[in-house]
Image (cartoon, rainbow, N blue to C red):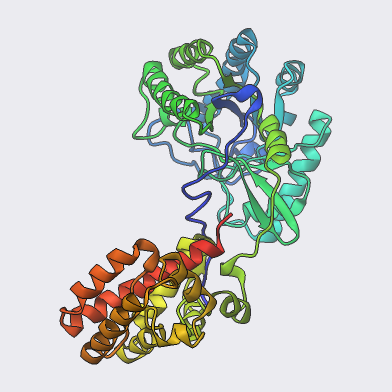
Amino acid sequence: MMRYARDMRGYGPKPPHAQWPNDAKVAVQFVLNYEEGGENCVLHGDAASEAFLSDIPGAAQWQGQRHWNMESIYEYGARAGFWRLHRLFTGKDIPVTIYGVASALARNPEQVAAMKAADWEIASHGLKWVEHKDMPETEERASIAEAVRLHTEVVGDRPRGWYTGRCSENTVRLVAEEGGFAYISDTYDDDLPYWREYGDSDQLIIPYTLEANDMRFATAPGWVTGQDFFTYLKDAFDVLYAEGSEGAPKMMSIGLHCRLIGRPGKLAGLAQFLDYIQGFEGVWTPRRIEIAEHWAQTHPHNRIERPSEMDKARFVELYGGIFEHSAWIAERAHTLELGAAHDCAAGVHSILCRAFRRASDEERLGVLNAHPDLAGKLASAGRLTAESTSEQAGAGLDMLTDEERANFTQLNSDYVTKHGFPFIIAVRDHTKASIMAAFERRIGNDSVTEFAEACKQVERIAEFRLMDLYRD
């Protein structure tokens, strides 16, 4: 049994209405990453210097050495950039969420005091600003626990939000297992919060961003001037605001770093954007924890039975009758690769159709022959499945005159004689008249063409049955 761990579906074509407070059309959320003093540095017990997200082109780690230039760039973020950003946001009365590296917070008490005085949320950004991809699971779990302990000691309250950034494949699960976080943000996969299930726990995920992010001042392709940053943020905001005005409000995350956007030539674009959004009605600028609280109250998680997690018996029980009298299709479908994308009508239909299409011509012919004659002897004998009875009734085939029934019976007899299987059509796509017209037209097809058409009709019938099963 193959199962695909990634979720390529999310909310699908119909995301929930965010219902932001005061009917806001968009939630614009600013994150300030506080990493200065938590980065790779031999003074911190690391093997090499930092090389990530600075204004040094092509920076590389210096093994066993301090990198004086790199250190001073990070120090600029703490000494000057933070205070410039603090003045900007408090002056505009816009709160931010701090992603605070615990060891960095411990080394910057004056900045922590300013964050608290401004009533900014201080979420956890891990213990150290280092790479976690090769960290053993036990070591990362211990690092998470120590990050929470040190953060609580330094700030006075435990963090309720988490973002590692340079994470491993285990990070989100391990943080969820810690059990104390209202949200985790180590994903970039949606414009709205959503829930993940870890055992018996339901964990809220609030996706973050790497594109509406000043880190692109330090990466290629990226921003060159503050105006570049403003233009991108404005364009993103305009699209999301328009969507919200049309009844589909979303969330816009904006990522900032003290040592990057805190430089005066870059900050001008951010300041321009703050002025821009304050000219609109219906814009909510919350801290991240407020989004989490709103979502948990307005959109609490509802666990559902998921096809991708069903055992074979349950899968066949639910879907064995979707293809007429052909439970073997569901049995084979269950052995294929299933994932979250299959936890919907379209997903189950896709996997069932794949099993049907893989079958031999003889097996598929058996499926065709399992279908009833339209308004024919099976209907008269009461041998139709409940689905077929309902489908035929919906097209008026249970209310035929004697002449119409005789006509259908003769056409079907001629069709079976010629092609070797009954005439099959997804009656819910048709009226009684259009079914008769299709009957008269298709009986003239060659059998190869008609076999292919009948198989497509079988798949369409299955699609309707699944839509009925998944109807809200």
The residue depicted at 69 percent of the width and 38 percent of the height is 298
- Give the percent coordinates (x, y) of residue 24: 58, 23
Q: Is residue 260 left or right of residue 113?
A: left
Dividing the picture into quadrants, the one containing residue 126 is top right
Q: Is residue 439 left or right of residue 116?
A: left
Q: Is residue 129 left or right of residue 459?
A: right
Q: Is residue 172 left or right of residue 3?
A: right
Looking at the image, residue 410 lies above or below residue 427: below
Q: Is residue 5 visible?
A: no
- Give the percent coordinates (x, y) of residue 62: 49, 41
**Given the current orientation, which residue lies at the most extreme front position?**
402
Question: Which is nearer the eye, 22 or 113?
Answer: 22
Which part of the image, by quadrant, shows the C terminus? bottom right
The number of numbered discs placed on residues in the rendered structure image is: 0
Looking at the image, residue 178 lies above or below residue 147: below
The residue depicted at 61 percent of the width and 73 percent of the height is 310
Question: Which is nearer the eye, 391 or 310?
Answer: 391
Dividing the picture into quadrants, the one containing residue 162 is top right
Question: Which is nearer the eye, 104 or 283?
Answer: 283
Q: Is residue 211 visible?
A: yes
- Give the percent coordinates (x, y) of residue 18: 60, 35
